[in-house]
Amino acid sequence: MTESTFSAVRAGDEYAAQLAEFSDEYAEICRKQAVLAARAARLLARSAAYADALADSVVPAVYPPAERRALSRRSTCAALAMATRTPEQTVQRATNDAERLVNEAPAVLASLEAGRISARHAQTIIDQLCDVPTAGRAAFLEAVLPVAEETTNANLRKRARVLRERLHPESLTARAIRSEADRRVEFEPAADGMAWVHLVTTAPIAQGIIERVEAAAAESRKAGDARTCGQLQADALAALALTGVTPDDVMSSPVLPHPIEVQEHIKPTVQITVPALSLAGVSDAPATLDGYGPIDPEAAARLAVNAPSLTRILVQPETGAVLSVGRGQYRVPADLQRAVRLRDGTCRAPGCGRRARACDLDHSVAWQDGGTTDVGNLACLCRHHHRMKHLPGWNLEHGPGGVLDWTTPDGKHHRTEPDPAPF
């Protein structure tokens, strides 16, 4: 064996040994993560059972039994969410999944605790299991668990869907009718002035929308439009929704309107916070669109021109303090309400992101207890956290500058501050 060959063999052995060390350690870390995930599931399931057991003693009897149980659970989830800086709905979903895992799929939980599957594998099984009627669940779990222990989560998702369809005792027609009730539209902010609009609807309608959008984009493309296919499809859908432009219109005039042209058709009731210097044209500091966040000054100006109902709020550029609140709306809310909603931005419970305009204006110190109706005693709370604040063990202190100090039933303290000025 030559020296070069010997060196190559030695390097190969060292690489193999080091790779084995990396892979073994990584596998062990993943196994420990699975063990911790199983431990978290057991804890969440226990917390839910405990909340149910104590609901009658924790929640006032003025509420009916079912509502007492729901409030007790939500109070428990809220405390866990605040302790971990996790969205409350995330904890609620995790708790529901944990109960299914612990109570309905103990074999899957045991596999997770042993590190044979990951938390993602377990989640995939639970997601599919929740749509399988009780009569078919045992057969589904018996068939899907061996697959989970031998394959990737992506492959498991495909196999689990097939197994679910094969073993589901209910017809697809019946399930489709039930699922149709879940149709909805969701808005999700993205970066740099963009956003997602998610439509959940029936498959035929979704496919029909895609085909219409593709047809309109294709016609415009044939006419020499230089926009990309993705841009044209997005612009076609926006035009269809906001201006009524259809693929039939494109056949006769195959140039799709540009997003700026489409935007001119928006007639919203909007609230825009504008730095005073930007309004004067001597600064390019961004405006803030309520419910989204920073937008460029030009877009804010276009909305301001077209919106028949607009609240314009001027702020001092250095401090963000309110300088004036416009009164151009048909129905003008009280200045105090607007000031509080502007200050808070969202529900003031820790971790809650519900927009302020969808929240109650709560007296931190109740009116009947001598609380005043002013900025120093008002805060935006969504209906859920407004009710939860009054449950035994919860306490809220309203400090200077709109700072709220929350105390949870387990004695932990959490502070929330007003929405910071975005400039």
Image (cartoon, rainbow, N blue to C red):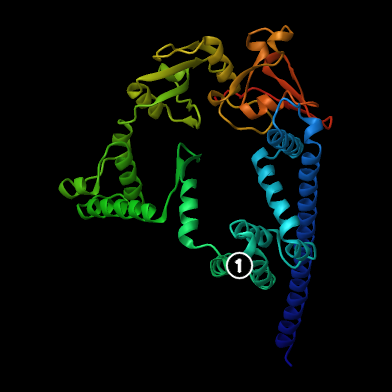
Would residue 222 appear left or right of 38 to someone viewing this image? left
**Mark 1 neighbour density, 10 Å: few (under 14) some (14–19) many (20 or more):** many
Above or below, 263 relative to 319: below
Q: Is residue 174 or residue 318 the one in the foreground? A: 174
Where residue 65 sits, quadrant-wise, is: top right
For badge 1, the amino acid type reads: Leu
Where residue 142 sits, quadrant-wise, is: bottom right
Kindly identify the residue that appears in the image at 74 percent across and 9 percent down: 369
Q: Is residue 341 visible?
A: yes
Please, which residue is most extreme toward the right here? 411
**Percent of width and height locating residue 287:** 47, 25
Residue with the mark numbered 1: 156
Q: Is residue 264 or residue 92 the one in the foreground? A: 92
Please, which residue is most extreme toward the left here? 252
**Percent of width and height locating residue 188:** 50, 40
Label 1's element?
A: helix
Where residue 340 sits, quadrant-wise, is: top right
**Percent of width and height locating residue 375:** 63, 11
Q: Is residue 9 or residue 52 the one in the foreground? A: 52
Above or below, 203 relative to 157: above
Kindly identify the residue that appears in the image at 61 percent across and 24 percent down: 420
**Quadrant in the picture for the N terminus:** bottom right
Kindly identify the residue that appears in the image at 50 percent across and 57 percent down: 175
**Percent of width and height locating residue 259:** 33, 39
Would residue 265 appear left or right of 74 to someone viewing this image? left
Kindly identify the residue that appears in the image at 26 percent across and 40 percent down: 257
